[in-house]
Image: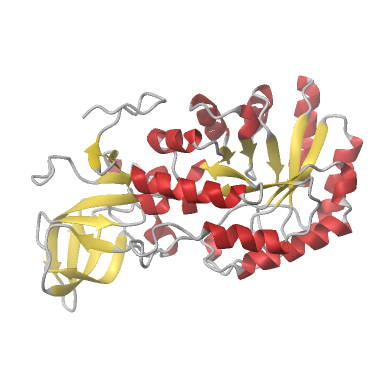
């Protein structure tokens, strides 16, 4: 147990006031244009976090059958659930159809054929939106770029007519519209402007409105500021949605949907770790923590950078490589990190861990599962995560 707080490290610490502030801003900015938000639950599926998001009336974007079932279990209405993913199994498709979810985001012609076959067997028409790769460069890391011509996600425009014809000819496929998603952690509005221009072209070229379309899903990907999380705790949702509204030219009756994940939750979370050892190398010094890539995969997976703060000390600055205990050389949180003189037992806060930290947690090396704690109205709180509705215990 940590002697400072009495809580075993490592653990995730969420600021629920900042979460609510972020959700307020997103809801207000989207409502000005009549846009609809589905929360991408893959970013963080903590029950307390998703419970608050549900209270704000957002829908859910899922990428697995388990996410669909978890969303239903957490009280999200089936009519607010969209289901994407390139490898939906037959059982997952059946499960989603049985629960009458709002829409499948379909990622290939063959998937469309499989959904049609299963819908026919079950005598349950499937609502579908066809995901199209617009060929827009998101200018983000290659592992989180998803909208280019050659990609496992989505359908190339050259195949779109085949998919549309299949929908038109089938009594079991209810065509809802188109779906786009160009990538994640996008920090410029320019890719979204280019996406709008490409959507306008595709919508007109393929006469999408004439096919009875009612929705356009623009995906998500809006980035956050990992370099200065305190100075920029809430993304500029107003500029984001205004840029879409100014450049998107689809009929007024088309409902525009978004799938935001990281931008809603990233900045409200931190990973708190304890320094186990400091180790002098030949030319550098290491701060070895009890958190590792098992609790925060992003730096090892795609060289992501997070701000790190020493919560225990201030003063003279030294340079450290902050690393974890996992038996992999990639288990590094940051190289040449400027910190006050850091000692065994110090607590470090790794910031911007509300997205893709807890949800990507691993048990590699048979690591114990890190727990989650919360700041609510500025006070430390512990919640019973077994209950769908959060309940303060201490």
Any part of residue 184 in sight: no
How many tags in the picture? 0
Q: Please state if 244 lies on the left or on the right of 18 as rendered.
A: right
x and y percentages locating residue 7 in the rendered image: 17, 40
Q: Report the residue at 47% width, 59% height from top.
A: 235
Q: Is residue 335 above or below residue 67?
A: below
Q: Quadrant of the image for the N terminus?
A: top left
In this picture the colour scheme is secondary structure
Residue 109 occupies quadrant: top right
Any part of residue 219 in sight: yes
Q: Report the residue at 30% width, 66% height from top.
A: 334
Residue 201 occupies quadrant: bottom right
x and y percentages locating residue 83 in the rendered image: 63, 38
x and y percentages locating residue 91 in the rendered image: 64, 27
x and y percentages locating residue 84 in the rendered image: 64, 42
Q: Please state if 244 lies on the left or on the right of 229 as rendered.
A: right
């Amino acid at each position: 147990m940590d002697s400072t707080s009495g809580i075993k490290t490592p653990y995730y610490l969420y600021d629920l006031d900042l979460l609510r502030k972020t959700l307020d801003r997103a809801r207000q900015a989207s409502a000005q244009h009549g846009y609809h938000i589905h929360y991408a639950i893959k970013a963080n599926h903590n029950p307390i976090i998703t419970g608050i998001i549900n209270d704000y009336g957002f829908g859910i974007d899922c990428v697995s059958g388990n996410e669909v079932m978890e969303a239903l279990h957490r009280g999200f209405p089936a009519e607010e659930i969209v289901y994407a993913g390139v490898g939906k199994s037959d059982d997952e498709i059946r499960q989603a159809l049985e629960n009458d979810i709002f829409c499948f985001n379909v990622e290939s012609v063959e998937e469309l054929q499989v959904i049609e076959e299963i819908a026919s067997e079950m005598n349950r028409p499937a609502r579908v939106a066809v995901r199209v790769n617009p060929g827009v460069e998101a200018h983000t890391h290659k592992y989180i770029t998803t909208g280019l011509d050659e990609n496992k996600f989505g359908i190339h425009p050259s195949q779109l007519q085949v998919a549309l014809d299949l929908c038109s000819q089938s009594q079991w496929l209810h065509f809802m519209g188109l779906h786009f998603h160009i990538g994640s952690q996008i920090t410029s509005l320019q890719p979204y402007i280019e996406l709008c221009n490409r959507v306008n072209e595709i919508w007109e070229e393929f006469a999408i409105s004439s096919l009875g379309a009612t929705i356009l899903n623009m995906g998500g990907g809006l980035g956050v500021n990992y370099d200065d999380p305190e100075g920029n705790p809430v993304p500029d949702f107003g500029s984001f949605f205004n840029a879409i509204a100014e450049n998107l030219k689809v009929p007024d009756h088309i409902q525009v949907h978004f799938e935001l994940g990281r931008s809603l939750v990233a900045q409200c979370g931190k990973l708190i770790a304890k320094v186990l050892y400091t180790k002098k190398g030949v030319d550098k010094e290491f701060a070895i923590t009890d958190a590792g890539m098992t609790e925060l995969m992003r730096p090892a997976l795609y060289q992501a950078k997070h701000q790190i703060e020493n919560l225990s000390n201030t003063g003279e600055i030294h340079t450290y490589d902050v690393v974890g205990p996992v038996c992999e050389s990639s288990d590094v949180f940051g190289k040449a990190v400027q910190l006050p003189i850091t000692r065994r037992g110090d607590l470090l806060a790794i910031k911007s861990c509300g997205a893709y930290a807890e949800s990507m947690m691993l048990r590699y090396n048979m690591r114990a599962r890190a727990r989650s704690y919360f700041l609510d109205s500025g006070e430390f709180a512990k919640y019973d995560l077994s209950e769908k509705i959060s309940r303060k215990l201490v």
